[in-house]
Amino acid sequence: MMRRREFITLLGGAAAAWPLAVRAQGERVRRIGQLTLNSEDDPEYRHSIAQFVHGLASLGWKEGGNIQIDHRYAAGDVERMHSLAKELVSLAPDVIFSSSTPASLALRRATKSIPIVFAQVSDPIGEGFVASLARPGGHMTGLTNFEPSMGGKWLEILREIAPGVSRAALLFNPQTSPGGGSYYSRPIEIAAAALGIQPIAMPVNAVGNMEPAVKSFARDPNGSLVVLADSFSVVNRKLIIGLAAQYRLPAIFFFRFFVTDGGLVSYGVDRSDSFRRAAAYVDRILRGAKPVDLPVEAPTKFELVVNLKTAKALGLDVPPTLLARADEVIE
């Protein structure tokens, strides 16, 4: 038989737990949409989106707990991405996270009211996502990943690692590259003139067109590839890396994982870092902030990565000065 004191103690403990239980039952689960041009089975994107989810968790938002994340992957299909954007909007999420210019563009067309946080966008002003970086002026905000001057920097690094190049093909997809490929062209042209390199636009709007374009370019000597920041290139990076190796073209890329997958050299932002930072934007919006009051952030962390194995295969001797500056050297 339970003693009276034990019963009172048990009752008091249960009563103390009631408010927490009531709050848990009454707390509205917040809904977050996530749209990307990447494939769901891309290990690099899985790693990046895991950083986004981890960032949210560190701020008190647990997937499967007080938030639900609806993930949508277009797997390189731009047309499908527009239908996925409409599908996400129909779910009426509290906020949507987009990770590329094409994904952000599709979402902007699908909604004028649901807050959108973007990452991996080069030119949010030129694309019409925001009025200015300091005052976005609408329902979109987030993080940029590159500035136009990066185009010139890529060419300079490429000449440093492959001093014999005199021609550079600028590889991009007009459907998915910032400004249809024009965003980086002017800085590259300026750098090319100073370096004595001939820049040649190589627009490729379908996977099947890529090898014929590269093969045709590689017929003449001293060629190289500058792979412009473009989600299409991310999705098809293994093909691009393979073609560069097959036709012996020194190539520079914009993300580290191109080089870990076998590319020669890369210079760009730490994508995982930008995904973690995007989580902070989503957190503030879920807590009541408006995109119009959240300035767009520029990248703060860049990394130079060199693959010595690929350089050796191309017959290139990487300068010690470049190796000394590299954040990572793959043997």
Image (tube, helix red, strand yellow):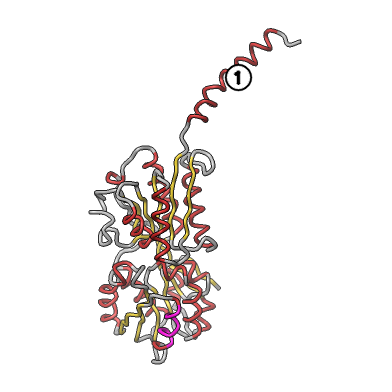
Residue lying at the far top in this picture: please name it: 4
Q: Which residues are magenta?
A: 208-215
Identify the residue shown where x is 48% and y is 50%: 70
Quadrant in the picture for the C terminus: bottom right
Q: Position of residue 112 (x, y in %)?
A: 29, 50
Find residue 302 and report its image quarter.
bottom left
Left or right: where does residue 10 sit relative to residue 289? right
Question: Is residue 178 depicted above or below 5 in this figure?
Answer: below
Q: Position of residue 279 (x, y in %)?
A: 43, 48
Q: Nearer the viewer, residue 130 or 244?
A: 130
Q: Position of residue 118 (x, y in %)?
A: 37, 54
Left or right: where does residue 192 sit relative to residue 276? left
* Residue that numbered label 1 is attached to: 14
Q: Give the prevailing secondary structure in the magenta stretch.
A: helix
Question: Is residue 149 depicted above or below 49 in this figure?
Answer: below
Identify the residue shown where x is 44% and y is 46%: 32
Find residue 125 and report its image quarter.
bottom left
